[in-house]
Image (cartoon, rainbow, N blue to C red):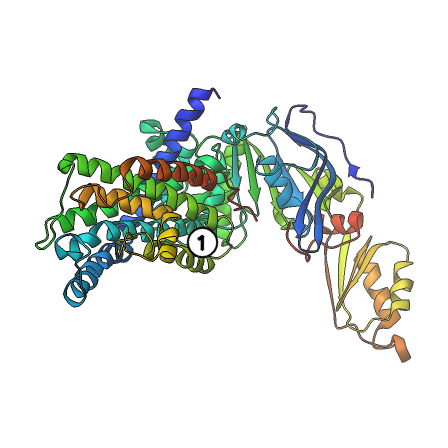
Amino acid sequence: MSLAAGRQGAAIACGALLRRDLRGVLRSRSQLYSSMLFPLILLAVLGTGVSEGLDPSHVRDGDYVTFLVPGVMAMTLLFSSTFSSASYYHDRDSGLLRVMLASPQTPAVILTGKALAGVTIGSLQALIVLGVVSVLPGIDLEWQYGVAGGVGLTLVALLLLALLLNGFAQLLATRIRTMQGFHLVMNLLLFPLLFVSGAFFPIDELPAWLKALAYANPITYAVDLLQLSLYAESSDGFIGIPIDLAVLGALSVALFLGGVRRDPGALP
Amino acid sequence: MAAQTTAAPPATALAASVEGVTFSYPTPEGERLALDSLTLEVPAGGVLGLLGPNGSGKSTLLSILACLRQPAAGRVTVLGETPSAALRARIGVLFQETCLDPLMTPRETLALVGRLHGLGGHDLRQRIDSLLDAVGLATRANALISTLSGGMKRRLELARVLLHSPGLLLLDEPTTGVDPDAEAAVWSLIGNANRDGVTVVLATNNVAEADRRCDRVAFLHEGRLAAEGAPAELKAGLKRDSVLVDWPDVASPLVDEISGWDGVGAMRWSPPTLHATVDDASRFVPRLFALAGPAQTGARRGGIRGVRIRESTLEDAYFDIVGAAISGGGDA
């Protein structure tokens, strides 16, 4: 097989795996609806509760609900990546992963196809959340780079974060034998990272030790990018696009490649 | 134990060969040897059965021929090439366990597998339709796999392994757990593929299936080749009859005495059954009852609860050659 034919075959295989996982999500209505409803409920309850019950002077116009939008999008992506990577266990346990590995595609192509499905599904879900909240009354997105620029930057932020999360989830999934263990570890690692990413409260007012943790956290840079695209009036008080893209880009590529190069370990 | 090998058929072309292949699985207690310097040739265009108990190395050998595992030592050639990912495009593998996503439909499954094999477009759709028709699943093409019966699932899996027109079919227990009708349908499809020139390697511990379906059979025992040949050749040196005596409390000296009788071949005591291969059961059984029947007294009296006699099969040939039964053990 020539290199070009091999690459074309790999691209077709990745496309087939992506379509198959997308179809699976659309078919699993409960997973789809709950993953979409949860962030909206969080926005309504947590956002309103904090806006009304706490001093929200640290966020723009005292509007905590709008502040929460980028964070909720990051959270949607995080949940989606966890669910998508759980499909690795479904395929392994049903035996379909063995069938995939018995095809002429390399394990890296199979895992890339599955990870790209996770990236696509997670990004789409986060974009749908954005689409819904942007037309809700009470949500006042700033779009400092214009709607087109903001959507473009949002898309980049979501794709990079999705690559990072799916690569990380793939790394874990190929090491942890049970789905229960996988969910436990994902939640244990990713929830604290989400909490200290600036998704739920601004990081510039945090104590030094927590601020240091936030800057060591890759999700912080994705949230910063999303906030700059959608919420911020200017880049003052934010990390900034160049640093966000550099940190997030490097980590995303490293984790994604690390994830898809693992031995899927599906053979008995 | 030196492998007993009868003459290969006139066809000289080989679909696959392994030479001195060794493979081990890592376990918490250390390495577990699954294949031990195994050498075997798979003639092109035939049906070769791999017969042996669980743990004899059949599935491991199939996974090496399927280019899914690399041996620690030895040489492997499949369809004239050294194993590679690209070579898997010419091999169809049917795993022992069902390997289907219950939340997909038969058509979606075949479309996914087709694309993984580089197929697509109108040709793939036509091939899927034709195969679904051939395996009798055309009317269930868009039903969720979770709603199919076990036999339907096995037929779908066979359609899956035939989808990319492989030159070599590797089948691991293809009819385990399916009803007789589904078994006949599965073998009809395999037979058609074989008549079209596809080489079949069948791993099984179903002796009757190997005897009936295979041109040649290889006996595997503890990762080594114990014997190889046509079923009739392997059975040629056997005693004619196989006698199974239900005898829970047989004394060891009696077994020794019986094994010394003329016309008695291999004997195995597997409580509560004494299994003997004999030249002539009609002479052996009366002599057995004369030795330990109800008329006897003392330690020799009674104890025989029943006797079954059948013609010797490949299982007896395996027993004769290997000195162990096909049933029992752990999987490999």
Q: Say which of B98 and B173 sits in front.
A: B98
User: What amino acid is at disc 1?
Assistant: Gly
Q: Secondary structure at mark 1?
A: helix
Image point 27% across, 55% down: which residue? A205
For label 1, the residue is B150
Q: Is residue A47 left or right of residue A257?
A: left
Q: Is residue B117 left or right of residue B282?
A: left
Q: Say which of B226 and A46 sits in front.
A: A46
Q: Is residue A248 left or right of residue B52?
A: left
Residue B49: x %, y % from top left: 64, 41
Residue B145 is at least partly visible in this image = no
Q: Say which of A212 and B307 sits in front.
A: A212
Q: Is residue B2 above or below residue B9?
A: below
Residue A51 is at least partly visible in this image = yes
Displayed quadrant of residue B228: top right
Image point 25% across, 38% down: which residue? A155
Residue A63: x %, y % from top left: 14, 56
Image point 30% across, 35% down: which residue? A242
Report the chain holding disc 1. B
Can you name the residue that lies furthest to the bottom here? B298
Image point 90% across, 63% down: which residue? B256
Residue A198: x %, y % from top left: 29, 52
Q: Say which of B183 and A139 sits in front.
A: A139
